[in-house]
Image (tube, grey):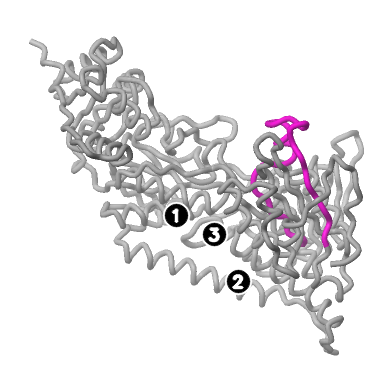
Amino acid sequence: MSLPPGRRARLSSPGTGRSFSEAREELRRRLMGLIEGNRVMIFSKSYCPHSARVKDLFSSLGVECNILELDQVDDGANVQEVLSEITNQRTVPNIFVNKVHMGGCDRTFQAHQSGLLQKLLQEDSAYEYDLIVIGGGSGGLACAQEAAILGKKVMVLDFVVPTPQGTSWGLGGTCVNVGCVPKKLMHQAALLGQELKDARKFGWEYSHQVKHNWETMIEAIQNHIGSLNWGYRLSLREKAVTYVNSYGEFVEHHKIKATNRKGQETYYTAGKFVLATGQRPRYLGIPGDKEYCITSDDLFSLPYCPGKTLVVGASYVALECGGFLAGIGLDVTIMVRSILLRGFDQEMAEKVGSYMEQHGVKFLRKFVPVMVQHLDKGSPGKLKVVAKSTEGPETIEEIYNTVLLAIGRESCTRKIGLEKIGVKVNEKSGKIPVNDVEQTNVPYVYAVGDILEGKLELTPIAIQAGKLLARRLFAGSLEKCDYVNVPTTVFTPLEYGCCGLSEEKAIEVHRKENLEVYHTFFWPLEWTVAGRDNNTCYAKIICNKFDNDRVIGFHVLGPNAGEITQGFAAAMKCGLTKQQLDDTIGIHPTCGEVFTTLEITKSSGLDITQKGC
């Protein structure tokens, strides 16, 4: 005799005299109460055949479930709308198992066939942890700590696989150890060199020779990074997050294997998992690349000055590293396969490259390395690079002390056992598709950070997404990470800050005739006495003429571009228009004030060169 399909759930009345927002919030609380208070909760409609199939499935498994028929409650339409806000699913059946959102009919049957449904039907107490985060970078740590603050039992697994050159680092991920932090500090070292030259024009007299010491810089930077590593460990300890320095790999649903440096294996289980494994630099796949080349993973702790350096790539990493190496006095060549700063505004990218070229960086365009040969040992040694033209049969050879590869990064998702639990991964890129609440196709597995498909690869994005994810999972929050109008800066010798759309993307999305582009060169006052380049720094905004001249693209090339962009990004979040910029009083004399006085449009063709500050 088959079991009945389940109990009919009831929604208590919200009462009267409430405002619309209060009633919605009360409805959301009541729905969350049903979800959290029942082992299986099905939101259904009595006439829906897909709902009937799901009810029959749970009945055949002997599992009692609570069912709310949306067509048989007074506020069914409102219930379905609030449910869609919670789950990002507008259809029924809408199914939760042990507080995990399963999805609809197809996903529930897929979970049953894979064995996942049976695992989910276990009580939460069957798992050692509420949440295990795989990856101790910015996004993973933010998510783990927020979940712990909310009272959950949390573990972080973090393990850095050494580079081919043997480089590894501590807790904190790419940004802290081999990314944003050391990059900005080395950029600062290069800027100080330029300011020393400027200082003479401002009356500073010094007769002794000024030179840069690589070892002193590296020691100071690594000491700072070490303090950050320790700070992260201390913060996890204070919040009672278990930190394990081991490599995490799924072995079955809800179960993970952790392997430490000695090869010892330990197994852990959790109700939910967050993937935050980040990315590592790509290699070329040519003779000598892994044996003799370095990447940004090695550069920031390199124990010796790299000497004459070839940087391969045209990414922001390539240009930033090439820029600060040249800024401390090294002979730098950047080998570019196609365009600079793919994905960024190309007018700005070419201006970045032009400035670097005028200040000592050599560019070798339309060439790719085909072989790296080791000639002499040393610190640094000597390497011969053979490169081939991308436009014909021409090959060239050159000798360098160091070859730095900066040709992009690969997601660390292929060797963590995702195939064993059925998590979908883009085969080509290694990135993970998620919905707008960072949930993968496997209901209890989520992902944040650089491994997400179609999302920006930026540290602050990962941190924001991680915090908000923890609040949605464990505090009933509905707030999602906003990936629109995210500001960023490329820390090249002349910094490039941007927010919103590139000019190319704006034309693609809105059509050229619907846009107005305002632009100008400007000359920072600090550069005038120092005799530095006029008509090099550049400002540009892209406005949508048919949306009240709203600013949809903000771009600045100049000193402190990051600091300038950060403030304007907040204004863009609020719907900044050209008129509002015009109405804003500038701070004089600053670089940022140029955006309050923009008058010349690109379409006018008028001259934008400047004669004074």
Of helix, strand and loop, which one carries label 1?
Answer: loop
The residue stretch that appears in magenta = 493-522
The image's mark for residue 221 is 2
**278 displayed left or right of 130:** right
Q: Can the viewer see residue 375 in this picture?
A: no
Q: CA distance from mark 2 to mark 3?
A: 15 Å
Kind of residue at badge 2 = Ile
Q: Magenta span has 47? A: no
Of helix, strand and loop, which one carries label 2?
Answer: helix
Residue 458 position, x and y percent, is 57, 50
Residue 570 position, x and y percent, is 57, 54
**Label 1 belongs to which residue?**
136
Which residue shows up at 40% across the image and 39% down it?
446
Which residue shows up at 26% across the image and 54% down it?
151
Kind of residue at badge 1 = Gly
Residue 368 position, x and y percent, is 80, 42
**Label 3 belongs to which residue?**
168
Q: Quadrant of residue 82?
A: top left
Mark 3: few/some/many CA within 10 Å (<14, 14-19, 20+): some
- Front residue (pair 385, 46): 46
Residue at the extreme front of the image, as rendered: 17
